[in-house]
Image (tube, helix red, strand yellow):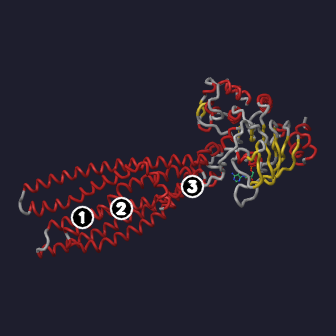
Amino acid sequence: MNSMRKLLHYIKPYKWFAILGPFLMCIEVAMDLLQPTMMQKIIDEGIAHSDHAYVIKLGLLMLFSAFIGLIGGAGSSVYAAKAAVHFSTDIRRDLFKKIGRFSNQNTDSFGTGKLITIVTNDIAAIQSSLIMTLRVFVRGPLLFIGSVIIVWTTARELFPVLLAAIPILILFIYYFSKKTGELFTHVQKAIDMVNTKLQETLAGIRVIKAFDRQEHEKKQFHRINNILTKRNMTAEQVILTLMPLMMFVVNIGIVAGIWLGAIKVNKGTLQVGVILAFINYLNIMLNGLMSSSHVLMQITRSFPSADRIVQVLEADIDITETEQPVLPQVVHGSVEFRDVSFSYSKNGESVLKNISFTAKAGETIGIIGPTGSGKSTLIKLIPRLYDPDTGEILLDGINLKNYSLTTLRSGIGFVPQKAVLFSGSIEENLRYGKAGASLAQMEAASHSAAASEFIDKLEERFSHSLTQGATNLSGGQKQRIAMARAFIREPGILILDDSTSAIDAISEGAVQDALKKSYPNTTVFIISAKISSIKDADKILVLEDGMIEAIGTHNELLRKSKLYQDIYQTQIGREISSI
Ligand SMILES: Nc1ncnc2c1ncn2[C@@H]1O[C@H](COP(=O)(O)OP(=O)(O)OP(=O)(O)O)[C@@H](O)[C@H]1O
C-alpha cells in the first residue's frame, strides 16, 4: 500500500487523463442507473394507463441515455488506458536507469531473474491495476451507492432486504481480498523462480546439449513450473469462489424482495413496476460490488509488485560518487593498494586480506596464483566494480573514491575473463570502447589485439554481424575483439583478466609486443594462470588465499617464492625436462 503511494507521483504528468477517465465513467454510471427507473415508469405509468405516447417517449429517452453512457464508457477507457500506460512506461524507464547504475553487489543481491520479473510482470500488474482503478473502481462503488440511494427513495418498503444482504457481501469481499494479497505474493516468487531457470537454461543451452542434460533440465523446469501452476490455481480458486457466493446472497435477496413485494402489492401499497426495478437495482448493486471486489483483488495483487518495484527504485547503490570529484587532465596510471581487504558479503570471509603494492605508471604487473585466490576480485576493485571494506586504493596518488566514475572508468580498458560481446557489427562492438572511433583506429586496435588476421578474411570486415552472445565467433576470436575494444580506448590502465586463455602462444606474444610498442605509457595488469604470459612483467604478484605471498620479477620470485617455484615447475620445468 505504502509502495503504491510512493509510485503515485508518476501519475502527476498525466493527471488530466487520470481525472478524465473516472469523470467520463461517472457519466456512464449515471446513465446506467437511470434505466431501471425509466423502465419502472414505462410499466407503472405508460403501460398501466395505456399511454403509448409516454411509452415511446421514455423508450427513446432510454435509448438516448444508453448512447450517452456508451460515449462516457468508451472515453473513460481511452483516458484511463493513456494514464496507466504512460505511468508504467515512466516507471519502467526509471527502473532501467537505476539497474544500469547498480553495483555488482546490488545486481548479485537481487538476482537477474527477479530483476527481469520486476521490469516485465510487476510493471504489467501495476499498469492493469491502475487502469482498473481509474475505470472499474469508480464504476463499481458508484453503481452500488447509486442503487442503494435509488432503492431508498423509490422502493423504501423493500429496503430491509438490502440492509440484510449488504454487510454479508462486504464481509466476503474483505476476507477474499486479504487472502488474494497473500496468495499473489507467493505467485510472484514462483514467477521469479521460473524466469531465473529459463534465463539460466537459455544461457547454458550449448552446455546442456553437449552433456545431453535436456531431460534433467526439463524435469527441473517442470518442477518449478508445477509450483507456479499450483500457486496460481490456489489464488485463482479463491477469486473464483467469491462470485458464486455473492450470487447466492443476491439471489436470496431477490426471492426475499419478490416475497415481501408480493405481500405489499396484495395489500395495494406497492406497484409491480417497483418490484421489477428493485430486482434490477439489486443486480446492478451486485454488479457494482462484484466489479469493485474484482478490482480490489487486482489492486491487492499488485501490492507485492509495487513493493518489489520500490525496492529496486530505492535500493542503496553501494558504489557512490563524491559530490566534488577531482578532475585530472589525464590518467597517468600509477596504482597503489594500501592495506586493502575485501569480502563479497558483509559478514562473510575476506576474499582479499591486507593487500599492499604499487604499480608505477607504464609498468606491467602480472598476477598469478591458484584458482579462487582472489586475482579477479583484486583487479575488479580498480574500476570500482566493488569497493574495499578497509584500506584504500590510489590512482595517481588520489583515492579512487575522489574521482567521478566516468573519469575513472574512461581511463581504464577492461578485458574480462569471459569475453562479453553484443549483437551487432564488429565495428559497433569496437565503438563500445571508443564512440566515434575512426577506421584507422579500429584497424590499429585490432592489429594490436591480433584480431586483424581474421577480420581481414571476413567479406564485410568491420561490418561483419555478430549474433547474440557472438556465437558465430570462436572463443579466441571473441577474446581478440574484446581486447581490441579495450585497446581502442588508449587507456591509462589496461586490465587483462585471463583474457588470452583461448589464444595461441604465438599470437599472445605478438599481442604483448604490440602492447609495449603501441601503448608504452599504459599500466597493464595481466592475470594469467600461465607463467609464460607474465614472466616479462615489471612486477608479479603471487596471490594465495587472498593474500600476497610474494612480489617481485620473474627471476626474483624463482628464488624467493615457494608457490611461484611450484607453479613454474609444473608448467615450465616439466616442459624443459621433457625436451
Ligand atoms: N560475486 C561473488 N560473490 C561471492 N563470492 C565470490 C564472487 N566472485 C568470486 N567470489 C569468491 O571469491 C573468491 C575469489 O574469487 P576470484 O574470482 O577473485 O578468484 P581468482 O583467483 O580470480 O580465480 P580463478 O583463477 O579461478 O579465476 C572465490 O572463493 C570465489 O568463490
Residue at image mark 1:
281
Residue 314 marker: 3
Q: Is residue 398 above or below residue 314?
A: above
Asked if the residue at label 2 sits under 8 Å from ligand 1, the reply is no
Q: Amino acid at mark 1?
A: Tyr
Q: Residues within 10 Å of mark 1 (few under 14, many from 20)?
A: many
Residue 481 sits above or below residue 301 on the image: above
Nearer mark to the viewer, of 3 and 2: 3
Residue 62 placed where, x, y %?
Answer: 18, 54
Residue shown at 16% from the left, 53% from the top: 61
The image quadrant of residue 242 is: bottom left
For the residue pair 406 and 537, the one nearer the viewer reads as 406
Looking at the picture, how far across and down is residue 278, in whole percent?
21, 67
Disc 1 under 8 Å from ligand 1? The reply is no
> Which residue has dot 2 on it?
292
- Using a 10 Å C-alpha cutoff, classify the residue at mark 3 as few (fewer than 14 neighbours), some (14 to 19) or many (20 or more): few
Task: Say whether residue 200 is left or right of residue 122.
Answer: right
Mark 2 or 1, nearer chain start: 1
The percent position of residue 329, horizontal first and vertical second, equals 71, 36
Q: Determine the residue positioned at 70% across, 35% down.
A: 486
Farthest residue to the right: give it. 559
Q: Nearer the viewer, mark 1 or mark 3?
A: 3
Kindly identify which numbered label has been placed on residue 493.
Answer: none
> Does residue 344 appear in the picture of this structure?
yes
* Distance CA(mark 1)–CA(mark 3): 47 Å
User: In terms of secondary structure, where does tag 3 sit?
Assistant: helix
